Amino acid sequence: MARPANDVKAATEASKPESGKKISGGHLVAKALRAEGIDVIFTLCGGHIIDIYDGCLDEGIKIVDVRHEQVAAHAADGYARVTGKPGCAVVTAGPGTTDAITGVANAFRAESPMLLIGGQGALNQHKMGSLQDLPHVDMMKPITKFAASVVTTERIADMISMAFRECYHGAPGPSFLEIGRDVLDAEIDLAKARIPQPGHYRASTRSIGDPADIEKLADILVKSKNPCILLGTQVWTCRGTDAAINFVKTLNIPAFMNGAGRGSLPPGDPHHFHLTRRYAFDKADVIVIVGTPFDFRMGYGKRLRKEATVVQIDMDYRTVGKNRDISLGLVGDVGAILAAVTQAASGRKSNGAENRKAWMQELLAEEHRMNNERMPKLKSDAQPIHPLRLCYEINEFLREDSVYIGDGGDIVTFSGGVVQPHRPGQWMDPGPLGTLGVGVPFAMASKTAQPEKEVVCLFGDGAFAMTGWDFETMVRFNLPFIGIVGNNSAMNQIRYGQIAKYGPERGDVGNKLGDVPFGEFAKILGGYGEEIRDPKQIRPALDRARASGKPSLINVWVDPDAYAPGTMNQTMYK
């Protein structure tokens, strides 16, 4: 039934901004953020940006204020990873923006969509030496997908929508906008401001690329005898987990996972393999790499044998074939591509179907052998505590809904081979920039976005110290989480290489730390804390931390002379 013309006219008029109604720049920022779906900003206050706060209060956007701008940027990054929506951090000019640079750079390498808004001096003080004036845009350009100044109040909302669009151009990443104090404080007629409406300024990014390549990959896979697949972070970024599961089960392919791809298949699933990636890469005839670049984590592609048919699927064209030649490359939404390949392969006869079962059994036998080989260390009662025992206890402690966060060097390298999340989106680590200090802000983001989920965070003692004061922010906002510090009083990942290169007499220079009782630190700030030296007390302490309902730190003193295999091989440098 058609609506009466006067009803249509009334609805149209109601959607128009009221002529003569004034709005400030800060309130325009808040309206534009709300249109994007932003419901929280992470921030540290400054005189340049306070009108944004006033606007956020009117728009119902939560303001989480932290103690360091690096934490604000990391939290915005973490929020994007958890929710699938872009995160947002708001910081002041000068040191406020430069403090946030590390968090932005980490999001850039991790392909995480977030917007950092930084303050700036007034335009009429341009290049006069105003308070905290720096060339923010020039500094941000190399580590963002988009960086620009907003020079008029009328353009604020339009520029914010532009920045968010750029966050999703190809593989996601961060954007930066610099907005001057006078632009934020100025008031304009609301009718003159273009405020993009939700759902009306984005295009779909769910491309499968060239359909002919979908057919090629389907043909390759049904003919292979010993295939394997690596599911990387982009599987979670695209929320393509269901497509990935259907792919590996329908085609009967063993799957390995890294980064945020961990948890795509639960532990114990017959297609989930964990310890035998190197073994599989050495024997597979077809290797499919999904959403993972050939960077240091993949030995720049050298860990894939030359004789194998290597297929790379990625959101970013520039990543495909970088550092290593490939047999086939597909660019687009990785979940959509996997779903299309599964459909294309259905009904085709598999030449390697009979041998596929033998291949799966071979990998499973090797998994069991490797796990049995390390089991004495996983259950060791030695004191100081072996890091593998700590990781084993954490893995046993995790619930179905526990989000696991790794923030550290050697201790988190240990955990990567032991800790297995039960569901998608429940593994968080810094990503390829290797940034220390993400743990507390990632926990902050996770508990803010999904308070019903438990957060378990393993810190190195050096990593925790970098952003640990925001433990107080967790207490202040009542964001309980279970933090564990693997404390060896050293930056052990660096210490090992230093000892190997220069000898023990110079091996401890610049990497030894003080013996800090972080459990007591937690108590001082209003949280729950314990000090653990007996491995048999790890699980009871974790249970007590869970029961406390508070932000907690269980400080576990681990053996400073035990090193992860990746550290001893120095694989991060090869």
Image (spheres, helix red, strand yellow):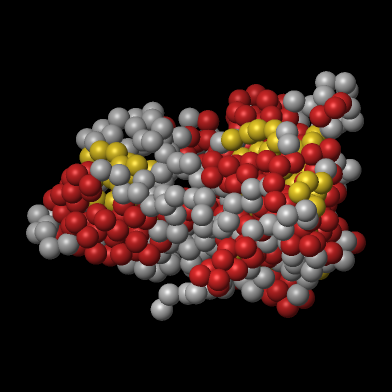
Q: Residue at x 85, y 41 (%)?
A: 48
Decide which of 462, 93 is in the foreground and name it. 93
Q: Residue at x 69, y 64 (%)?
A: 448
Q: In which quadrant of the rendered image does the N terminus lie?
A: bottom left
Q: Is residue 374 visible?
A: no
Q: Is residue 469 left or right of residue 214?
A: right
The picture quadrant where one finds residue 243 is bottom left
The correct choice, above or below, for 230 with respect to 18 in the image is above
The correct choice, above or below, for 13 with respect to 499 in the image is below
Q: Position of residue 122 (x, y in %)?
A: 84, 32
Q: Position of residue 214 (x, y in %)?
A: 23, 48
Q: Residue furthest top?
A: 127
Q: How many marks?
A: 0
Q: Position of residue 196 (x, y in %)?
A: 59, 51
Q: Is residue 172 left or right of residue 497?
A: left
The picture quadrant where one finds residue 498 is top right
Q: Residue at x 64, y 41 (%)?
A: 159
Q: Is residue 433 left or right of residue 183?
A: left
Decide which of 501, 313 is in the foreground and name it. 313
Q: Position of residue 411 (x, y in %)?
A: 62, 50
Q: Is residue 410 left or right of residue 226?
A: right
Q: Is residue 211 visible?
A: yes
Decide which of 146, 403 is in the foreground and name it. 146
Q: Residue at x 87, y 21 (%)?
A: 128
